[in-house]
Image: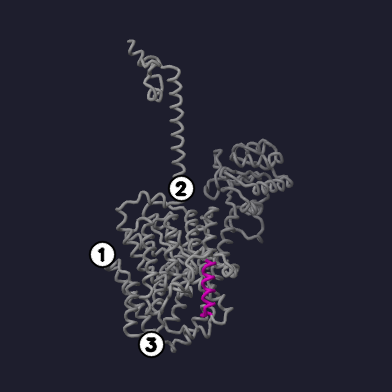
Amino acid sequence: MAAESSSRGLDLLSSPVQSSSSLMDIDGVQGEPTTLDVERGRDSIHDSDNASFHKVRGGAYRKRIQYYVPGTAWIPNYTLSFLGGDILAGLTVASMLIPQSVSYATSLAQMSPLTGLFSASIPGIVYAFLGTSRQLNVAPEAALSLLIGQAVSDILLDFPNPHSKEGEMVKIAVGTIITFQVGLFAFLLGFFRLGFIDVVLSRALLRGFISAIAVVILTEQLVPMFGLTALMHELHPESTFDKVLFLLEHVPMANARTTLVSFCALAVLILLRALKGPFQRFWWIYRLPEVLVVVVLSTILCKEFRWDEEGVEILGAVPIQSMGSFVQIPLQSMTLKYLRRTTSTAALICVVGFLDSIVAAKQNASRFGYSISPNRELVALGTSNLAASFVPGTLPAFGSITRSKINGDVGGRTQMASLVCSVVVLLATFFLLPWLYFLPKAVLSSIICLVVFSLLREAPHDVAYYIKMSAWTDLTLMALTFCFAIIWNIEVGITLSLIASLLLVVHRSSRARMTILGRIPGTDRWKAIDEHPDAEEDVSGALIVRIRENLDFANTAQLKERLRRLELYGLGKSHPSEEPRRQQATVLVFHMADVERCDASAVEMFLELCEEYKSRHVRLFVTHLQPSPLAMFSKAGIFDLLGEEALQVNVADAMARIDRR
């Protein structure tokens, strides 16, 4: 029994005390714990608590780092099981991206092939460590390269010889400053958590913009495909519409060999892509890089049969040293000279590029079962373009829906695929370009035309859908974007459409959702009369209005007018010229259960509204008020103005007050 009692007494001591001391007294004989043992136990408990605290704190820091730099999360946990698929995906995308980036740089952006290749490699490396999407491939895009080309063309109008050395330096400076601004804008949008902009712009606007881009690109590329580039530089048609007229007039003067080469290349590209559908079960056909095949074949044939002697323009020599130093600070006197003239283009590229990227990222995230952060995507894309701007002349780089889908289809499961792709593109930049000396430029234009078909693929379906749904606003917005872009230019078209889209958003958000409540017969329950036909509206001159959303400065500005229309016309549609269908209310009851918060401007406007109704001797009641709006109303002095009885728990209590009066 004594042993059991001693054991129970020892159990009462904490485990750290037992671990730090074997309960030996000073002479080394086992016995009762001494004061020294207890102090040691307390120190041990304190050390254990500190260790736990630092462990938790270290875990929180690690999670923060992994959130801001996602590469620190997937790289330590990378397994060899992903390596085969990532390498195959990287090689497949690179084989498609190398000729595409050369085409975008030379045919659309009017710059050196080097700018396209560097833009297809450096941003992808940076994004691999900062991006939250596992399959997104970041590189130049056709639409964005076209915008760069238009900015370059506008600035080169000030120079008598755009193809001189000075003209080439201007192209590099314009590309550099635009890429820097694009990166800065995207980074700031992500830093200030404005990633929600992808839900502000409607799909109709984007579809109109993409369709217009496709038509503009097709028109631009038909000129070199017919061998009319030199003649176009002489006549210099400005808008896309002018270039269409130019083509119709001068097609009979086309170079026969160039026309044959370009359209045969386009036919082979379409044929090889079409074969991938029926023969998808054969992996080597599905993964066949048709663009690379056409580039290699056309280069060999051009060298063998000397097409360049028959008037076919070739890529020629592209010296690596043509860009000067590989790394330069983007903000220099030469680039700052064009800062103001390119800011609007950079802002437009930033918005459009992010929208394409976030769509591609969300599609892959949904497909492979993970989540992405639009704000982190903006920061990653912004940082990628900022880093790329330190290489002179690079083009803005964003995610591609097509490349990212192929990346996932082939086996890419992490951003290691993008790293492999970027390394392959860099190797091609330094070692492959001399082998492309005889590559016909018309073939590059044919490659871009293949992209046009992808851009136009969904347009007929969307138009038919809008007509079927009688969505005339969306259809009008799409048509306006398309027409303005074709008649004037891409920048004007998308800018006007952005303004129209934002005005629609503001217009819809400025109309606070409200309804009139009526009593369910035989009860004290009040329901919306437009949703419950049996609800009967009060006939004693009381108007009961339920506000169905939070109040802010935007939707409260028209609150007075909306209430006046409800008071005089009810919920039905009416024209301001019509005679009122109802008598003015003598009592107004606000049901505010759905108002969880309101800002100071909204409260101020509500106070002014109450003052006006009180001057008309209209009694006001506020019911179902939530704690946050209640505090705001009290601070603003609304209940001092209306009296304490104006605040009621529910509509039934307010109506009881009215009946007693």
Q: Is residue 564 left or right of residue 594?
A: right
Question: Which residue sits furthest top?
Answer: 1
Q: Residues within 10 Å of mark 2 (few under 14, many from 20)?
A: some
Using the image, tell me which numbered label, if any, was put on residue 456.
none
Q: Which residue is mark 1?
A: 281
* Residue 168 is covered by the magenta coloring: yes
Q: Which residue is mark 2?
A: 65
Q: Judging from the image, what secondary structure is the residue with disc 3 in? A: helix
Q: Amino acid at mark 3?
A: Glu
Vertical side of 47 occupied by 288: above or below: below
Q: CA distance from mark 2 to mark 1?
A: 43 Å
Q: Nearer the viewer, residue 488 or 446?
A: 446
Q: Nearer the viewer, residue 644 or 33?
A: 33
Q: CA distance from mark 3 to mark 1?
A: 43 Å
Q: Residue at x 67, y 35 (%)?
A: 660
Q: Residues within 10 Å of mark 3 (few under 14, many from 20)?
A: few
Q: Judging from the image, what secondary structure is the residue with disc 1 in? A: loop
Q: Amino acid at mark 2?
A: Ile
For the N terminus, the quadrant is top left
Q: Are marks 3 and 1 in contact (CB under 8 Å)?
A: no
* Of pointers 3 and 1, the one earlier in the residue sequence: 1
Badge nearest the viewer, 2 or 1 = 2
Vertical side of 225 occupied by 337: above or below: above
